Image (cartoon, rainbow, N blue to C red):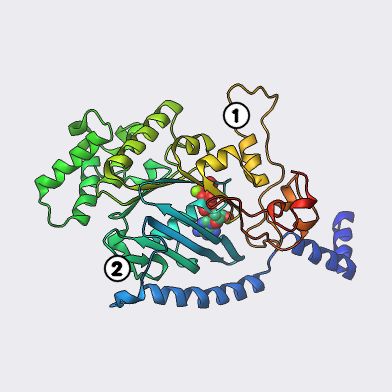
Amino acid sequence: MSDISKNNNSNINNDKEQAKDKALRKKANYISAKETSSISKRNKKIVDSFEAKRKRKNVQESEYTTTMRDPNNVVEFDDLHTYFFTDIGTVKAVDGVSFDIPQGKTVGVVGESGCGKSVTSLSLMQLVQRPQGQTVKGEIRFNDGGGKAYNIPDMPDDKMQKIRGNQISMIFQEPMTSLNPVFRIGAQINEVIELHNPEMNKDAVRKRTLEMLELVGIANAEGVYNMFPHELSGGMRQRVMIGMALSCNPKLIIADEPTTALDVTIQAQILDLLRNLKDKINSSIMLITHDLGVIAEMADYVVVMYAGRIVEKGTAHEIFHSPSHPYTVGLMESKPAINKRVERLYSIPGKVPNPINMPNYCYFRDRCNRAFDKCAGEYPPEIYLSDTHMVTCYRYAEDTKGEVDK
Ligand SMILES: Nc1ncnc2c1ncn2[C@@H]1O[C@H](COP(=O)(O)OP(=O)(O)OP(=O)(O)O)[C@@H](O)[C@H]1O
Ligand SMILES: [Mg+2]
């Protein structure tokens, strides 16, 4: 036996070393097989009860109808909690999110990667990865415009299908993965129109598909109708996706990073297109992006998310002219600006906390350069700076305002 392995053996047999090793593993979030198996047993129980509720048949409408707080809103997220029950613990991807999407307006949702933007929108579509992903608490009220409002998390699958794609549609980040590579473009749009308008005949469906392709600025609509997705450029594929999303005149369009995969000129064209189409069919847009430039150009209201919660929200004017949360201020500083010369763009130090083990104090405190004593306390409450401008930061609390330099 070599000296090294002798050494290793004596180390492992040493109780002290073992205890140290265990502590180190705990610190590194190591989970033993036994722990994993008990977590997954517990998870199964939880998700099974949610799934059973979802699969119910012949549910009375009164069980999932509700009333809007303000009838001018299309959607109201109210204290939404969406968790993923994984074998290594519960990921609190969205943990108490509330905001409204008013009729005919664009609401921008910003925040760094992994903060829960996509999970918020997927919860609205009931498309969170099941069974591990579940909306465990809160309401998402959807106004159908015909005098009825639904609470989406309570809706059974068969009812949800009528809303998804028809009244709310989604434009995904990566058009190549959302279009089916083995079907022609025309057939894919036809399918969407047929599904939601069973009364239309084949010719009417084809006509509508061609109209949609023209509407989104595809010059050779007849040609593209017979093409496969791989024969189109990225920008054209994104236009097709937008055409498909708008083919049923939805009340709400969710655009999740619609231009991230495109170059800047095509990006500008697609944003223009979205804006014009929105006005034409008078729908609302929930625009998800980490590009503040896109938000500035498009949004009426802005919601800033951090680690599954909203840290600041307000009108676009409020957020861009008086950003208040240190995280929003950091985001603004890390955006390049014309006529401002800097050696190097600002980057927010540190990283987002682990969503499985969230601290019970402000999630941003450890990265915040403006933290003070009070920030050691529990998660800050919502503080309203105006009727529409909300921030969760102790710097703006009535009782601690005087303690900090603003
Ligand atoms: N299927 C899943 N299983 C487990 N965790 C998930 C799953 N999907 C998302 N999450 C977790 O939920 C959190 C929020 O993810 P989400 O996709 O909403 O981020 P995002 O804000 O959209 O980020 P990006 O800007 O990169 O798209 C992340 O911590 C992610 O790891
Ligand atoms: Mg995302």
Circle 1 residues within 10 Å: few <14, some 14–19, many ≥20 = some
- Occupied quadrant, residue 31: bottom right
Image quarter (top left, top right, bottom left or bottom right) of the N terminus: bottom right
Give percent across and percent down for residue 358.
Answer: 67, 61
Pointer 2 residue: 158
- Occupied quadrant, residue 234: top left
- Occupied quadrant, residue 240: top left
Q: Quick check: can you spot residue 162?
A: yes
Q: Nearer the viewer, mark 2 or mark 1?
A: 1
Task: In the rendered view, tell whether residue 87 sits above or below residue 392.
Answer: below
Q: Image point 39% across, 65% down: which residue?
A: 152
**Mark number displayed over residue 272:** none
Q: Image point 45% across, 29% down: which residue?
A: 263
Give percent across and percent down for residue 403.
Answer: 80, 52
Circle 2 residues within 10 Å: few <14, some 14–19, many ≥20 = some
Q: Image point 23% across, 40% down: which residue?
A: 212
Image quarter (top left, top right, bottom left or bottom right) of the C terminus: top right
Q: Which residue type carries mark 1?
A: Pro
Does dot 1 land on a helix, a strand or a loop?
loop
Q: Quick check: can you spot residue 226?
A: no
Pointer 1 residue: 336
Q: Which residue type carries mark 2?
A: Asp
Give the CA separation, mark 2 to mark 1: 47 Å
